[in-house]
Image (spheres, grey):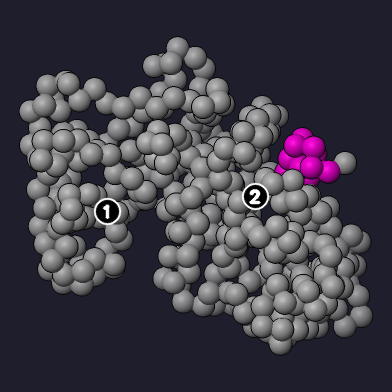
Amino acid sequence: MSSVIPLYHAPDFAEERFLSAPNVVTAPAPMDGVAPDGFHSTSMFPEYFKVDGRWLLLENSRMDASVVLTPDGTLQVMVNRSLKQGDRVILGRRETCEDGIYVHTTGFDAAADGVEDRFVFRQGRSRETAFAKDYDRLIELLQYERDHGNILWVMGPAFSFDDSARRAMAALIEKGYAHGLLSGNALATHDLEGARYHTALGQDLYTQSPVPNGHYHHLEIINQVRRCGSIKKFIEEYGIDNGIMHSLVKHNVPFVLTSSIRDDGPLPEVIADAYEGQAAMGAMVKKATTVICLATALHTIATGNMTPSYRVMEDGTVRPVYLYCIDAAEFVVNKLVDRGSLCSVGMVTNVQDFITRLAKGLGAMD
């Protein structure tokens, strides 16, 4: 593993506190969608559970979920609404072995390696913070992740309102720096509007000046895409050759678009059911090793709640999951950085400037 990624240090289970700890206690879910009293709720950190004398690491974790001990003795993370009556739900609110549960908060502690942790939790991010070093670290990380990890972008519609930002994000996709994207109806709609009419909400992408009847453009796009039946067919039938959605489709990068109560249309791919959309987002998050959230408060917070601070790889190794939040609002950045992950980094800045600088730093565009 590259020196970019810190090594994981598992707990020493030979210590007395682990040896003397009891096995976990379970209770059946009393009915569908309801956990038993005293259920254990998961965090962002690696968590171990003692089952039949063995400490098992919880894989594919997320925040605020229950843990089910399956009939074959494995652990399954499950949000409470998905519980089925009779599921064996682990109980316990003490997290330092007393209940057979151990939350490991120091697994990526750089002190154990004797080296500086390049991607450590940093507090006090504000618009006065200098982010030059953060750009350097992120560029180094993405260069590694392009070939060895999974980069997930969580994007608000701000990118589709700026010509340079659209080109920068499309260039990053073209160069392989995107393995998935989470967004909503607005980003896709206005990006396709930009591709066809060079406007977003009727304003020219470059000059920001309104064009005659431009307020119809996004509605025309939604209507045209719905007539075609999908974004991909629209791109093909209308000869779209630029933009974020074009690059995603061209390179078969998966995307999940989830609905908002204020959506026009929406586009055919937009998932209208909130919980179905949440599940689709969660499936993408489970693959991610670096998540970059940009100018979308609700999508950012939702994704943050689904993203653990670690990932168990196919070969059994454990590595950190990096979570970046870039937003002009300090509230959104601090909300995510304070979520309890060692690997959260916030940057308070304009996302159009951020994505353009990042693309240039990665050599994706001139």
- In the picture, residue 347 is in which quadrant? top right
The residue beneath circle 2 is 178
Marks 1/2: CA distance?
28 Å
Residue density around tag 2, few if under 14, some if 14–19, many if 20 or more, within 10 Å: many
Residue under the image location 16 percent in, 70 percent down: 85
Vertical arrangement, residue 276 with respect to residue 323, above or below: below
Q: Which mark is residue 76?
A: 1
Which stretch is magenta?
353-365
Earlier residue among tags 1 and 2: 1
Element under label 2?
Answer: loop
Q: Amino acid at mark 1?
A: Gln
Residue under the image location 45 percent in, 52 percent down: 286
Vertical arrangement, residue 4 with respect to residue 238, above or below: above
Residues 218 and 149: in front is 149
Residue 183 visible in the snapshot: yes
Left or right placement of residue 253 versus residue 366 in this view? left
Q: What x and y, as percent, mark residue 138?
A: 64, 34
